[in-house]
Structures are given as C-alpha cells and as structure tokens.
Amino acid sequence: MTLANLRDVLAPAAENGYAVAGFVVLGWEDALAYTQAAEETGKPIILQAGPGSRRHTPAPVLGAMFRHLAEQASVPVVCHIDHARSIEECREGIDCGFTSVMFDGSDRPIEENIALTSQISEEAHRAGVSVEGEVGFVGYAEGKASAMTSVEEAALFDRESGADAMAISVGNVHLQTEAEARIDMDRLREIEAATAMPLVLHGGSGIASEKRRELATTSRVCKFNIGTELRQAFGRALRQSLKDNAQSFDRIELLKPVIPAIRQETVKVISGLSQ
C-alpha cells in the first residue's frame, strides 16, 4: 500500500528541490494514466477530485477508485479533495477515504478563512488526513479575476491555520489553455520569506514548463495543480479514436487510446518538476 498524504510527499520535495504534481481527475482513464506515469517515472503524485469531478461522480466512488489505484502503486499516491468550500465537504472527503483535503476559504475574510481552516485541520489531522488552504484568490481564464496573495495574510495563515500547505495567487490562473501566466517573482519571494509551509500553485497548465521547472527547483513551491493541458491531450486522443473507429459503438474500445496518450503527456509533466 502506498497511500500518502501531503505531508508525506511535500516535505521530501521541499528538502530535495523538486515539486509534486496534483492531477485533476475526471474519470477512470485519466486517473489510471496518471498512476501509470507515476510508476514509470518513480515519482509521487496527487490524484485530485475537484468540484466538477465530484458533481459528475459521487465522492464515495472517487474515493474508492483513488484508493484502489494508490494501493496498487509502488510510489506514494495522495488521494485529495480539491476546492472544498465547506467543512461538510471536507468531512465527506475524510469519510470517503481521501487522505488529503483542500479547504478553499479564499473568498472569505482572512480571519474567517483561518478559523475554518484551523477547525478542519484539527479534525483532519486526527484522522491522519492532510489539509491544504488558500490565501488570495486564483482566478479563471474566462471568469472571475485573481486577487494577489497578501504577504501579511499569508504570514498570518502560516502561523495560525494549522494547514499543511498553502495555495497562493502570484499570477497563476485556472483553466488557461496557453502557457502565458506571468508569475510575480518578487511577491513569491516575499511570501517565502514570511512563511514556512509548502506552497502550492493552482493553474499549473498556464505556467510554461520551463518556468515550472525553475520554480520547482529554486523556490518553496512544492505542488503544482495540472489539469487543462492533460484534458487537451484527452480531447485530441479521443477525437482521433473516433475518427479511426468511425463504426464503433463500444465506449471501452473508443476510450482505450486516450490512456497511453495521457500517460505520455503526464510523464513529461512529472519529469519537468525536478532537475
């Protein structure tokens, strides 16, 4: 069994100058491909069930699927709830076998964000589950704009929340289809100087691979969330499969080719987060 939580995988990453990829899971095919890529590279990964994934597939099903893959893997695999907006969602994740939860209180005043994160951290830690929080707001490519993380608020959260990792907003954006995010390195360095816990960048697909490697090896950013570029790999492979098998109605056969296609792209992502 190689079930792990964020503390298990992020502490070694911070100490040894690399980062761990948190992969957005939308179904069996991508979860399997991510785990195969982790095996191929010998690196830990984080399987993430975000709000869209949980709306499509119930958390108990996702939790069982993630744990099954983790238990078969020879590398550490974290089973993570992403962007839970309430304590109840976090509790559901813990009850469903996830080893890590993210409480996203970034839309709340910092004092409320810290109080709620602290409460879920106490409950989660009693169950051996890690907690990620967020300070500042990471916006969306075609949605609500970002709010840069305040250094003072990050320092307060670091001291008082009890969380194991902190997601920050320094120019990264969710759902970018092109790698054009501009990371504010000055703000990142200020946050690093004022805090101690591992840092997380959501919207990793929008950060150029060269910049991801630089950040992974020279900063305290230990976790990158990756989704969009691998969704694109899925889409390209599925369109080709439909073209190649125009007469087929067997969804299993139609979906089979997406697994090696996603795995290949995932290996590139994982390999790009270390020296």
Image: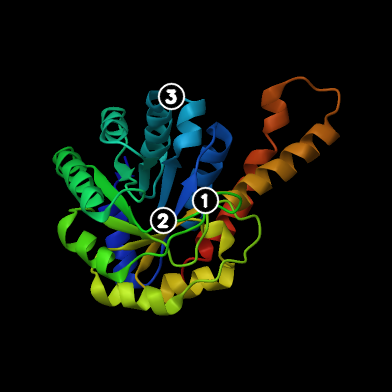
- Asked if labels 2 and 1 touch by Cβ distance under 8 angstroms, the answer is yes
Image point (65%, 55%), residue name: 177
**Label 3, label 2: how many angstroms apart (C-alpha)?**
26 Å
Specify few, some or many for label 1: CA neighbours under 10 Å numbering under 14, 14-19, or 20 or more: few
Say what secondary structure mark 1 lies in: loop
**Mark closer to the observer (3, 2):** 2
Q: Position of residue 81 (x, y in %)?
A: 37, 39
* Image location of residue 83, percent across then percent down: 39, 43
Q: Earlier in the sequence, mark 1 or mark 3?
A: 3
In the depicted structure, whether residue 137 falls above or below residue 78 = below
Q: Residue at x 57, y 73 (%)?
A: 210
Numbered circle sitting on residue 58: 3
Quadrant in the picture for residue 178: bottom right
Q: Amino acid at mark 1?
A: Lys
Q: Could you tell me the amino acid type at mark 3? A: Pro
Q: Which residue is mark 1?
A: 144
**Residue named by callout 2:** 137
